[in-house]
Image (cartoon, rainbow, N blue to C red):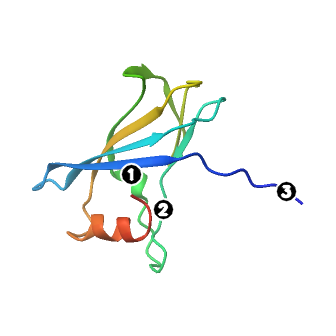
Amino acid sequence: MTSVLPLPPTHYRVTLLDSHAHLFEVACTVEQPDAEGQRFRLPVWIPGSYLIREFARNVVAIRAESGDMPVGLDKEAKDTWRAAPCVGQDNALVYGEWLGYGSDGVARMHAAGII
C-alpha cells in the first residue's frame, strides 16, 4: 500500500494582459514548495472533452520567483517544469498563455479546476 501525501496549499491569480491576443498571465503560488524543487505541470486535456489540447504549447513566457527573487526553472518535459529548491519560502510560477482555442477557454479551464 502506498501512502499519498497531501498537496500543499496552492493559489492562482489570472490577469488579462491583452484581450485581442487572448493573452493572460497566470500566477501559481505554492505555499510549501517541495524541498527538492517544485514541479509545475499543465494538463493536455480537459475532463469531459476528448480533444487533446496540449496547454503547455500555448505558454509564451515563463519564470519562477521566490521572495521576489528569480529562481531557476528547468523544463523536464513538454508539459512539466521544475523550479530550483526554495526551502521556507513561497514558490511562484508565472506564465503568459495564449488561449487560441475559443473565447470561453478561461471559463472552461476554471470549471475543470485547471485555474
* Residue furthest to the left: 20
Report the Cα–Cα distance between label 2 and label 1: 9 Å
Q: Are marks 3 and 2 in contact (CB under 8 Å)?
A: no
Give me the disc on residue 44. 2
For label 2, the crowd category at 10 Å Cα-Cα, with few meaning under 14, some 14 to 19 and many 20 or more, is: some
For label 1, the crowd category at 10 Å Cα-Cα, with few meaning under 14, some 14 to 19 and many 20 or more, is: few
Report the Cα–Cα distance between label 1 and label 3: 33 Å
The residue where tag 3 is placed is 2
Q: Quadrant of the N terminus?
A: bottom right
Sequence-first tag of 3 and 2: 3
Residue 17 in the image: above or below residue 107: above
Q: Quadrant of the C terminus?
A: bottom left
Q: Position of residue 20 (x, y in %)?
A: 9, 56
Sequence-first tag of 2 and 1: 2
Report the Cα–Cα distance between label 3 and label 2: 26 Å
Rendered image quadrant of residue 33:
top right
Local SS, label 1: helix
Amino acid of disc 2: Val
Amino acid of disc 1: Arg
Give me the disc on residue 57. 1
Local SS, label 2: loop
Local SS, label 3: loop
Q: Position of residue 66 (x, y in %)?
A: 44, 25
State the residue in front, 12 or 52.
Answer: 12
